């Protein structure tokens, strides 16, 4: 529906629609304080502000409970009827996976839920089941605290996608590139660095806290490390590349098990942090 049509609804119906975008009562209630909305930019600004500044771990955990498990078809049709159509589309590529991949996803989903106390949340749009399995495998290595940080970021990506679908939003802010991006090139092969795990960390009071995580795609990129229009605070950050597993995957003996790139964020402009890697050396620069 159009924003005009959404604003013409009753508050009760508008609230239900927003709740289908994000299952946090606090986030929805905060959003409804500005209903009816003025324009697309205001909706996005409020969505970011309320999620990252006004919501807490309790609210994030509540939102997580309103998602089906990745690859769990039964939960899509039974438990989550209100969002089953959206969730089916978001997870569309899971259906193309092999039986073995689906079984491994289910197995590791259970292990993740047992460890963290909540289900595995990932913005599945555009990802194959194999890519999601890689992400899940790496994220199982995180602590529960790290995973709350990562999962809340993934939840917000999903919220943005659902808001855009719900309100037929077209402003460029809804598809803006991630504030931080990367591209890995293997200079020894002249090819993209595929399926490399990357962690984005922030230095908070002397401690490195994982803020986001992803795995490079077949082109060596992670296009959606952060949600569209969300900007990190000014500060000291790291991108940590798991290059050891990458070289092992191709049977190459590499010298660097990980590559850590330190950088500083000064403003809201785009930060591209590429990595040129080979088994015995690497380089980086600020790209565009």
Image (cartoon, rainbow, N blue to C red):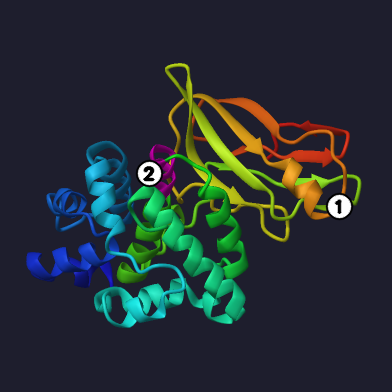
Q: Is residue 57 visible?
A: yes
Residue depth check, mark 2 versus mark 1: number of the one nearer the observer? 1
Please tell me which residue is depicted at 59% across the width and 53% down the height of the picture.
Answer: 223
In the depicted structure, whether residue 288 falls above or below residue 174:
above
| Residue shown at 26% from the left, 79% from the top | 81
Q: Main structural element of the magenta stretch: helix, strand or loop? A: helix
Across and down, in percent, residue 288 comes to 67, 40
Q: Which residues are magenta?
A: 144-153
Q: Which residue is mark 2?
A: 148
Q: What is the crowding at mark 2: few (fewer than 14 residues within 10 Å), some, or many (at least 20)? A: many
258 relative to 152 in the view: left or right: right
Image coordinates of residue 269 in percent, x first then y, are: 54, 36
**In the displayed structure, would residue 112 be above or below residue 105?**
above
Residue 221 placement (x, y as % from top left): 67, 52
Give the camera-side residue of 196 and 225. 196
* Residue at which label 1 appears: 251
Mark carried by residue 215: none
Mark 1, secondary structure of its residue:
loop
11 in the magenta segment: no
Give how far across and how far down residue 1 sits, in percent.
28, 75
Q: CA distance from mark 2 to mark 1?
A: 34 Å
In the foreground, 39 or 288: 288
What residue lies at 88% left-to-right and 34% top-to-bottom? Answer: 280
Does 279 sit left or right of 195 as displayed?
right
The crowd level at tag 1 (other Cα within 10 Å; few <14, some 14-19, many 20+) is few
Q: Is residue 18 left or right of residue 260?
A: left
What residue lies at 16% left-to-right and 54% top-to-bottom? Answer: 25
Could you say whether the residue bearing mark 2 is in a helix, strand or loop?
helix
Q: Is residue 200 left or right of residue 196?
A: left
């Amino acid at each position: 529906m159009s924003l005009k049509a959404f604003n013409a609804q009753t508050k009760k119906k508008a609230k239900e629609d927003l709740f289908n975008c994000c299952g946090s009562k606090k986030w929805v209630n905060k959003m409804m304080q500005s209903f009816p909305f003025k324009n697309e930019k205001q909706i996005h600004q409020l969505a970011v502000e309320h999620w990252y500044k006004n919501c807490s771990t309790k609210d994030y955990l509540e939102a997580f409970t309103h998602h089906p498990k990745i690859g769990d078809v039964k939960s899509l049709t039974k438990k989550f009827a209100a969002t089953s159509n959206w969730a089916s589309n978001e997870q569309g590529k899971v259906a193309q996976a092999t039986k073995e991949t689906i079984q491994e996803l289910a197995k590791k989903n259970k292990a993740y839920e047992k460890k963290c106390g909540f289900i595995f949340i990932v913005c599945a749009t555009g990802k194959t089941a194999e890519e999601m399995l890689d992400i899940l495998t790496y994220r199982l290595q995180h602590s529960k605290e790290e995973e709350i940080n990562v999962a809340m970021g993934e939840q917000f990506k999903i919220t943005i996608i659902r808001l855009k679908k719900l309100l037929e939003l077209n402003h460029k802010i809804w598809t803006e590139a991630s504030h931080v991006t990367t591209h890995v090139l293997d200079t020894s092969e002249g090819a993209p660095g595929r399926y490399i795990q990357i962690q984005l960390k922030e230095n908070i009071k002397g401690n490195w806290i994982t803020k986001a995580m992803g795995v490079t795609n077949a082109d060596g990129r992670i296009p959606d490390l952060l949600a569209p229009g969300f900007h990190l605070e000014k500060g000291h950050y790291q991108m940590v590349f798991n290059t050891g597993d990458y070289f092992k995957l191709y049977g190459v003996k590499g010298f660097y098990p990980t590559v850590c790139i330190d950088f500083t964020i000064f403003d809201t402009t785009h930060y591209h942090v590429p990595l040129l890697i080979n088994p015995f050396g690497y380089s980086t620069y600020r790209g565009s």
